[in-house]
Amino acid sequence: MKKFLVILLICLSSLGLYSANAGDVKIAWTPSPSTGVTNYIVYASTNSINSSNVSSAQIQILAGPVVAHTLTNLTVGKWYITVTAVADDSESDISNVVTATIPAPAGPVIRTKNRP
């Protein structure tokens, strides 16, 4: 199996993790320096991800030389995210696993009026 290098970057607002809408997370990564990369696969799960259980995570296959993607409609909670590169029908090891937390929506604001 060929070795590829994919470094996943995700962090709070100023450094790469953007949440334009509740449940959306934008991720970005350093492209693999390997030749022949045809796809990247993004894995996301509410369970911790490692190389032995990554196949149980939700996947999104991205064709071409993309280096960013927005995961949409994620449910409330902590998400574990990783990326692999695909070249010549071989998939790389997983990148570093990063986390993103989708907060619960804020409840309604109830205002009371003081009565004399």
Image (cartoon, rainbow, N blue to C red):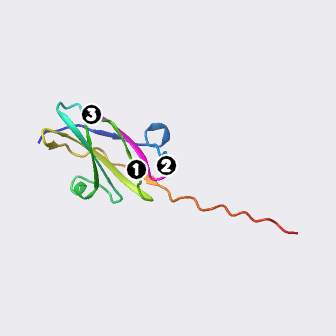
Q: Amino acid at mark 1?
A: Thr
The amino acid type found where label 2 is placed reads: Asn
Helix, strand or loop at mark 3: loop
Q: Position of residue 110 (x, y in %)?
A: 69, 64
Q: Earlier in the sequence, mark 3 or mark 1?
A: 3
Task: Name the residue rendered at 62%, 62% in the picture.
Answer: 108
> Would you identify the image quadrant in which residue 84 lies?
top left
Give, as a single range, the part of the protein colored magenta: 21-31
Q: What x and y, as percent, mark residue 33?
A: 23, 30
Query: What is the distance, in whole Å, between disc 3 and disc 1 at their CAs?
Result: 20 Å
> Mark 2 sits on what residue?
21
Binning the other alpha carbons within 10 Å of mark 1 as few (below 14), some (14 to 19) or many (20 upward) gives: some
Q: Which residue is mark 3?
A: 65
Q: Is residue 39 above or below residue 22?
A: above
Q: In which quadrant of the rendered image does the C terminus lie?
A: bottom right
* 59 and 83: which is toward the camera: 59
Earlier in the chain: of badge 3 and badge 2, it is: 2
Image quarter for residue 83? Answer: top left
Q: Are marks 1 and 2 in contact (CB under 8 Å)?
A: yes
